[in-house]
Image (cartoon, rainbow, N blue to C red):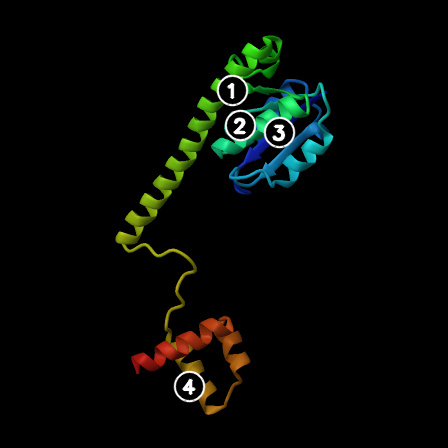
Amino acid sequence: MKIGYIRVSDKRQNPDRQIEKMLDIGIEERFIFVDRQSGKDFARPAYQSMKQVLREGDLLYLDALDRLGRNYDGIIDEWKELTRSLGVDIVVLEQESLFDSRRFREMGELGKLMEDQFLSLLSYVAEQERNKIRTRQREGINIAQRKGVRFGRPRVEMTEEFQEVVKRWRKGEVTAKEAMRICKMKPSTFYRRVEELKGEA
C-alpha cells in the first residue's frame, strides 16, 4: 500500500504543495498523514498514527528527507526502524534517484552499507540546514533589537485616559475590576502600569 507523510514546520505554513504531489502519484487522501510542527523529534500525532498503520511491504513517500525530521541521529534511527524492523520501503521524492530504499534492499548487504552512507550524508545536511535557520533567526532578532524593534506584546501606553481611570480607582469611584475593564488590561498589566505611574509622578 502507498502511504504519504507530510510535515510543515508550523500551522502558518501550507502543506498543499506536498499533498498535491502525493495525490499525483496515486496515494489516496485517507492515507496521507500531515503534521504541522517542528521536526526536532518524532513525537508528532500524525507521524505516530501513520506508524500504527504501516505494514511490511508498504511504500512510504516523503517529499524531502527533512520532512521526516531535522535531527541527524533521529532520522537515521527512524529510517532504519521503518525499513529494517517494520519492512517498509521509503521513497524521498526530492532525491528519488538516490533515495528509494527498494534499490538498496535489492543489493543485499552492500545496499545496506550504501544506504547508511547516503543517509548519514543527507541527514547531516538536513540538520546543518536547521542549525543555519536558527542562527539566521537569532542574527535577525539581534539586528532588529539593536534598531529598537520590540518583540512580544505591544506596550500599553500611559494615556491620559488610563491616568484618569487610576485616579478614580484610587478615590474609590470605580472598582479595580471595572478600571481594568475600561483600560482593557489584565490584572498583572494594570498593577504594573500603576506602579510605573507612581514612578513617573
Assign a secondary structure to mark 2.
Answer: helix
Foreground tag (2 vs 4): 2
Query: Is 175 positioned to the left or the right of 154 in the image?
Result: right
Q: Estimate how packed mark 2 is, as few (under 14), some (14 to 19) or many (20 or more) residues with alpha carbons within 10 Å.
A: some
Assign a secondary structure to mark 4.
Answer: helix
Q: CA–CA distance between discs 3 and 4?
A: 59 Å
Query: Is 118 positioned to the left or the right of 195 in the image?
Result: right
Pointer 4 residue = 167
Which is nearer the eye, 127 or 28?
A: 127
Q: Quadrant of residue 201?
A: bottom left
Which is nearer the eye, 135 or 29?
A: 135
Q: Earlier in the sequence, mark 3 or mark 4?
A: 3
Look at the picture and state if 147 lies above or below 63: below
Q: Earlier in the sequence, mark 1 or mark 4?
A: 1
CB within 8 Å, label 2 to label 1:
yes
Query: Residue 190 got which mark?
Result: none
Q: CA–CA distance between discs 3 and 1?
A: 21 Å
Q: Residue at x 54, y 80 (%)?
A: 178
Q: In which quarter of the image is residue 29?
A: top right
Residue 93: percent from left, percent from top: 55, 19
Q: CA–CA distance between discs 1 and 4?
A: 71 Å
Decide if residue 21 is in sight here: yes
Q: Earlier in the sequence, mark 2 or mark 3?
A: 3
Residue 5: percent from left, percent from top: 62, 29
Query: Is 200 positioned to the left or the right of 21 in the image?
Result: left
